[in-house]
């Protein structure tokens, strides 16, 4: 994330918006490097329970009014096809931000969204595993205790 931070030198953003879940770790790291403390999240997934493609977000229960007239940096781990980022951009535009920029770690050129800042452009068919992701075959024991 230091490479993106260098690209951001001299640019001021009022808010970082992490695209959850993939953008949570990159946003946390970038905020520590740059000192940005205004962070919000946009939780979205591309598929519903029926596996038909659709965007499902938390924006029905959350307001982004605080982004009005603000400069926003959207942060995610990967731009693959770009449909998720396009949905986020269009949704946030409804709140009247001053400016929206996009930063990602990896960018695949087939994406319908071109990032403003990125670390690496990779081939469209490249599979990317992030070191903070859990092994998909890992199962955790069910917690049977009581939360306090």
Image (spheres, rainbow, N blue to C red):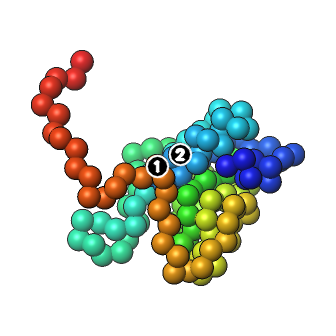
**SS for tag 2?**
helix
What residue is disc 2 on? 25
Expressed as whole percent of the image width and height from the top left, the position of residue 51 reads 27, 72
In the rendered image, is residue 47 in sight? yes
Expressed as whole percent of the image width and height from the top left, the position of residue 31 reads 65, 38
User: Is 103 placed above or below 63 here?
Assistant: below
Q: Residue 106 is drawn in which quadrant?
A: bottom right
User: Is 50 placed above or below 119 here?
Assistant: below
Q: Which mark is residue 132?
A: 1
Residue at point 29%, 66% (across, down): 48
The residue lying toward the viewer, choosing from 125 and 59, is: 125
Q: Which mark is residue 71?
A: none
Q: How many marks?
A: 2
Residue at point 62%, 59% (across, down): 105
Q: Are marks 2 and 1 in contact (CB under 8 Å)?
A: yes
**Quadrant for the C terminus in the image:** top left
**Could you tell me how far apart the alpha carbons at marks 2 and 1 are, in whole angstroms?**
8 Å
In the rendered image, is residue 60 in sight? no
The residue lying toward the viewer, choosing from 41 and 97, is: 41
Expressed as whole percent of the image width and height from the top left, the position of residue 81 reads 53, 76
């Amino acid at each position: 994330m230091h490479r993106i931070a260098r690209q951001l030198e001299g640019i001021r953003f009022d808010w970082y918006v992490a695209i959850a879940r993939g953008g949570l770790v990159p946003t946390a790291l970038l905020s520590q490097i740059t000192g940005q403390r205004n962070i919000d999240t946009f939780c979205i997934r591309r598929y519903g329970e029926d596996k038909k493609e659709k965007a499902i977000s938390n924006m029905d229960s959350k307001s982004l009014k605080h982004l009005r007239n603000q400069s926003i940096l959207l942060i995610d781990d990967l731009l693959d096809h770009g449909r998720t980022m396009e949905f986020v951009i269009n949704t946030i535009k409804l709140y009247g931000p001053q400016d929206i920029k996009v930063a990602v770690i990896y960018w695949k050129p087939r994406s319908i969204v071109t990032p403003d800042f990125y670390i690496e452009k990779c081939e469209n068919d490249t599979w990317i595993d992030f070191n903070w992701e859990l092994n998909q075959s890992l199962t955790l024991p069910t917690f049977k205790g009581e939360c306090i």
